[in-house]
Amino acid sequence: MEELRLRCFTIDLQLFAEKTEKPTAKRRQEAAKKGQIANSAEVNSVLVLLVGFLGVKFLAPQFADGWAVLTSDLFKMFGQKDFMVDYRILQSILMMALVFSAKILVPIVGGCLVAGTAASVIQTGFRFDITSVKFDLNNIDPVQGVKRIFSLQSLAELVKSILKVLLVGYIAYNEIMKEFMNFSGLSDMSIRASAAFIGTVALRVVFKIILWLVIIAILDYMFQKWRNEKKMMMEKHEVKEEHKQAEGDPQIKGKIKQKQRQMSMMRMMQALPKADVVITNPTHFAVALQYDPETMSAPTVIAKGQDRIALKIRETAKEHDIVIVENKPLAQSLYFGAEIGDVVPADLYQAVAEVLAFVYKLKGKI
């Protein structure tokens, strides 16, 4: 058993040691969706206890006075000579006691419920996670159960529980010993005075216990936050993989770009037969222009390419009897100065107009 315990601790420490990178925003969001948020049960408990303590402290005198009046009235009723006990009277007395107790207890219990809910909402926000109630075979796995028993979390919970028991016992013992000599005088006091004395001592003990439990709750929340941060820590390869997924796999991105270029080339080649002229470098650049005076404000570049693509444009132009004009400066200026679908730059209007005039004259259009 000792060997198994050491092995479990070693596994926990190795997991923490291997994860050296801070969690990314995506990892934090995924953890939050799964309910892996820093949440201390001590904060819930101490807030509920504090609200319950305040409720008892402020409502206990009213509760005691009310019960005293109710008891006094009952004794007076029972002391009457003609008083007869039947089930109706007993039912009425019971209802009176229940209604009176409810008026005092409902605000205290309601306040505790609100405090517990508020503590959870403050720590985790408004979240509802159904995954925690799903059936999981790991929950009944003996090996996993032993790992949970001898994990760092179990050790921390054990230390925390022992600390709380010792603390509560010490505070209660210390406060009772301070008032030990006064307890001997309770026999000389009235019932009301004795109850008030005991209630005062009890409230003081509870109040000091709550103050220390608040400190424990703060430390426990800090520990839970640290532990949750450690759980979300990532290995270097995990961070790289996440960045790769966020940016896209380079191979996939390369294939997408290649596909886009192929589609663009197909559209360009399909539009090329509509060209009026192809201006070349003659071998390095080729730019195809189209001009329709009725639909275009200026000649438009419908295809362009360099080297291998330029050769393909020239071959296609020859197949469709498109005039090819060699003009090195104009071909380079058009290639670098306009994209496919753009009209030619204004400073090239004159040169392009001369080329088109030559082409139209050659084809007999003018």
Image (spheres, rainbow, N blue to C red):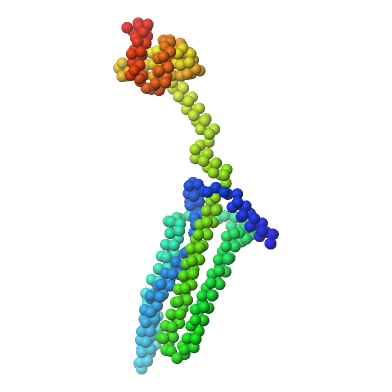
Look at the image and tell me in which quarter the C terminus lies: top left
The residue lying at 37 percent from left, 74 percent from top is 103
The residue lying at 42 percent from left, 11 percent from top is 327
The residue lying at 45 percent from left, 60 percent from top is 120
Task: Give x and y (percent) for residue 241.
Answer: 55, 41
Residue in the foreground of this view, choosing between 75 and 158: 158
Task: Give x and y (percent) for residue 249.
Answer: 53, 36
Residue 278 visible? The answer is: no
The answer to which image quadrant residue 147 occupies is bottom right
Look at the image and tell me in which quarter the N terminus lies: bottom right
Figure label count: 0
Residue 215 visible? The answer is: yes
Residue 357, compared with residue 201, is above or below; it is: above
Residue in the foreground of this view, choosing between 228 and 277: 228
* Residue 44 appears left or right of 65: right
For the view shown, which residue lies furthest in the bottom direction?
81
The residue lying at 40 percent from left, 14 percent from top is 330
The answer to which image quadrant residue 236 occupies is top right
Task: Give x and y (percent) for residue 59.
Answer: 38, 76
Task: Give x and y (percent) for residue 54.
Answer: 41, 72
Residue 346, compared with residue 50, is above or below; it is: above
